[in-house]
Each structure stands twice: as C-alpha cells, then as structure tokens.
Image (spheres, helix red, strand yellow):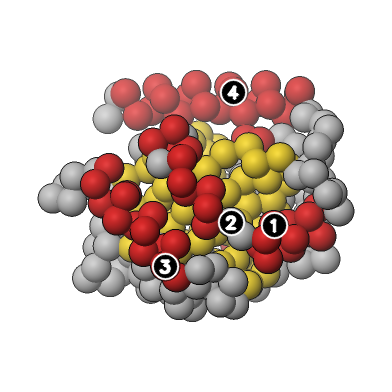
Amino acid sequence: MLSHGFLTGCINISEISRIRSIYKKLINLTRTENVYIENLRDHVPDSVQLINETVLKKVKELLDDQEPILCSVELHSQMPRCQAIPPHQDNFYHCVENNKGLKVLIPLTKMCADSGGLFYCDINTSYPIIEHRPSNIKNFSSYIKEAKFKELKLKATSYHYELGDASYHFLNSIHYSIGNQSNYETTFVVFRYQSKGAKINSKALQKYKECYKEHMELISSK
C-alpha cells in the first residue's frame, strides 16, 4: 500500500472556519516566526471536531482497527518565505510497529507545494526507517541527510489542497517541503492516530532520545 493519500472535500468548511478563528485568537498575528503547537487539544479542545465520521472511517480502514487511538493534535503555522522542511520519517521518533500509525493533515488555508505543502515520497507503508541526524531547526528534531536522500532516488507527490480537503500518511512515509514560498501565511492541523495495542520499539525510541538530546544542544548553541 502507498504510504500517503488524498481525501477530497471530506472536511466541513464551516468547522474549518470556526477552528481557524479560535486559532487566530490563540497566537499573535503580528509575529514573524513560524508557530508549532504540539498539544493543540489542550488549547483548542474543539479542534477534534474537524475529524468527522467520514475521515474516522477512513482511518479505521487504513489501520485495520475499529478503535484507533488519537495520540496527538498539532498546529503548524508557516510564515511567508519560511525555511524548508528536510526529508524525514515521523516513525524515527514515534517508533511504532509498521502500518500501525498514521497522520491526517487538514489545512486551515488553501495550500500547495509552493506554499508549504509537503512532498510525499512514493513508497509503501513498510518502507524501512532511514538513518536520521539531529537537526538545528527549532521544533524539528531530526532529518535524513541530503546525500543519503539523493541516493534513494525516490519520486514524490505533492497535493493541492482546497478548503475541505485533507491528506494522510503512514508514519514510515518520507516527506519534506520547500517551505512557504508564497506571500501569505498557511496553517494546517495534524492528527496522529495509532492502532490500539500497537507496540513501541524501545531500542529505536532510545536511539531517537539520544538524537533529540543532540538536537537540543544544537538549538541552545545557536
């Protein structure tokens, strides 16, 4: 199975507008930096209302689990001309067994590759985890080195999101962006789901913790 996919017109636009208005009150609109909020449910409990029965049914189908667990809700806001996101795999830090975890991305604004949308490599859901290195980018802990990524010679797909569209990717997906090259801010919410009872690879998790420690040292030294 391909590690990513697109869901057209599945989200209620009035819900998007409502959540976006709450989000605008949450953060300072005059800021000049990107915003990343990891625990969005704590700040905006209603954010979970973006996930309707249609989307949840798809998540259950993809994970082959009728009781998937919503592990986290994240808010990403990208300012114009922001920094690119290097290639990475989310499962380098979540360390969940193959095919047992995925993310649903719901834009709160129109979004495409040039305005911060992700490029998803066209690989299957069980593609192995590639070696990652600690990053010196705030709120982004680890990445696949450019030389290693080029060696893989992978093709990638990007999506053009209208309001109401969404996408999903399994945790082993390799993805990246070229940053927001537009003149307007783009925002999206990411929901991470995991199969009930999914196992965590403790050795992989320890490896990530060591990488994260190095990442924090790089950030503090800047």
Say whether marks 3 and 1 touch (CB < 8 Å): no
Residue behind mark 3: 14
Q: Earlier in the sequence, mark 2 or mark 4?
A: 2
Say whether marks 2 and 4 touch (CB < 8 Å): no
Answer above or below: position of 163 versus 50: below
Residue behind mark 2: 51
Q: Please state which amino acid type lies under the numbered disc 3.
A: Ser
Callout 1 secondary element: helix
Answer above or below: position of 111 versus 61: below
Decide which of 114, 195 is in the foreground and name it: 195
Kindly report which numbered mark, 1 or 4, lies closer to the viewer in this rendering: 1
Cα separation, mark 2 vs mark 1, equals: 6 Å
Residue behind mark 4: 209
Q: Please state which amino acid type lies under the numbered disc 2.
A: Ile
Residue behind mark 1: 56
Say whether marks 2 and 1 touch (CB < 8 Å): yes
